[in-house]
Amino acid sequence: MKWYLLIYFFIFYSCSSYAQNNDTTMDSTRIIKPDEEWRRILSPSQYAVCRLKGTEPPGSGKYNKFFEKGYYKCVACGARLFDSDTKYDSGSGWPAFYDVHEKENIKHRKDLSHGMVRIEVSCARCDAHLGHVFEDGPEPTGLRYCINSLALDFVPAKEK
């Protein structure tokens, strides 16, 4: 009788892990790469921010005081994240946006690091760390997406 249980658990475990793996590979929008490939694609500074959840020093990012028309995409995978018309100068030392391009492109998770309670923001497509979101931004959302320049690429608006 014990061998029936053993076979049952083996079949159940095999089927459930196959289904989980199958779900992951069937999701065509998700980008998963080995660590070595991320190191090849990203500069060392970008890698430290996007993959190791680091941050650039305040005031050092190229997009902090940058206000051209266009949009910002993930430096790691190219997903469109923020639009220039939602960018503002928060005085924090990092690029700030009061809204995202599409909510589906951003993931939020609780971050308890450094003795603080914050909400981490990452790219939903490739899981690149972008920065944090705070509830002290301007209307209409009241949010401040505080984002590392190193996690972004800017695409200028096309002139008419």
Image (cartoon, rainbow, N blue to C red):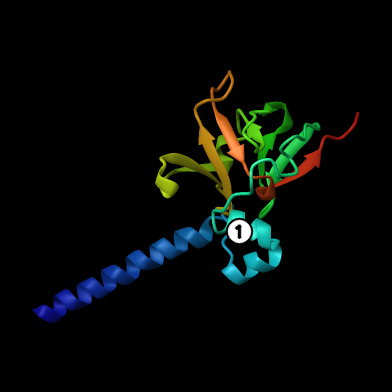
Residue 147 vertical position relative to residue 38 in the rendered view, above or below: above
Residue 88 vertical position relative to residue 106 in the rendered view, above or below: above
Residue at the disc numbered 1: 48
Instruction: Write down the quadrant of residue 41 in the picture.
Output: bottom right
Give, as a three-letter code, the residue at label 1: Ala
Q: Residue at x 69, y 68 (%)?
A: 40
Counting labels gives 1
Quarter of the image that includes the N terminus: bottom left
Residue 4 picture location, percent across and down: 15, 77
Residue 135 picture location, percent across and down: 49, 27
Residue 144 vertical position relative to residue 47 in the rendered view, above or below: above
Q: Residue at x 61, y 71 (%)?
A: 36
Depth check: give the residue in front, 88 or 6.
88
Quarter of the image that includes the C terminus: top right
Q: Residue at x 53, y 40 (%)?
A: 132
Residue 118 picture location, percent across and down: 45, 39
| Crowd band around label 1 with a 10 angstrom C-alpha radius: few (<14), some (14–19), many (20+) | some
Q: Residue at x 78, y 31 (%)?
A: 67
17 sits to left or right of 121: left
Instruction: Write down the quadrant of residue 77 in the picture.
Output: bottom right
Residue that sits furthest to the left in the current view: 1
